[in-house]
Amino acid sequence: MTAQAPNSEPAPTSKLLRMSIILSGLIGAAGVTLLALSAHADSSGLLKTSAQMLLFHAPVLLGLGLLAQARRVPFLPVVFLLMVGGIFLFSGDLIARVFVGGRLFAMAAPTGGMLIILGWIALALSAIRVHPK
């Protein structure tokens, strides 16, 4: 990393960093809330699984934003969208089963899971095109 000149302006905050901070905070809070609810109001285990998925990925989303701020990684927005979309589908379907008594739509959770897996693969492949800012 290069040192910043004393009188130069700091780099502007990337949109991906701002969005990752917001979503990481909200997804983390939802994960903790669902984990607490799962201990008291759900015997199926679906809320616990949903909470774990949310809590595992909240710091990952934050990391993606920090990486976007520090480096130029062309595939990072795609990784972010795949993971966020997958998390919402997967966890949303499990939450709907508990609180609504039905699914978001047929194959919502497996589709979400596949999007998350593709997001992880896209993250690994993005290492090919990492450049300094």
Image: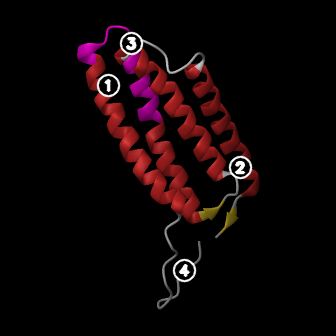
The image quarter in which residue 112 lies = top right
Residue type (three-letter) at the residue carrying disc 3: Gly
Q: Which quarter shows the C terminus?
A: bottom right
- Kindly report the distance in space between the C-alpha atoms of the residues bearing marks 2 and 3: 34 Å
Residue type (three-letter) at the residue carrying disc 1: Leu
Marks 1 and 3, the one that precedes in the sequence = 1
Q: Read off the residue under disc 2.
A: 126
Q: Which quarter shows the N terminus?
A: bottom right
Residue 35 - label: 1
- Are there few (<14), some (14-19), or many (20+) residues within 10 Å of tag 2? some
Residue positioned 48% across, 21% down in the render: 93
Residue positioned 47% across, 89% down in the render: 6
Q: Read off the residue under disc 4.
A: 3
- Kindly report the distance in space between the C-alpha atoms of the residues bearing marks 1 and 2: 32 Å
Q: Read off the residue under disc 3.
A: 45
Q: Which residues are magenta?
A: 39-56
Give the image location of residue 83, x and y in percent: 57, 38
Marks 2 and 4, the one that precedes in the sequence = 4
Residue positioned 36% across, 32% down in the render: 31
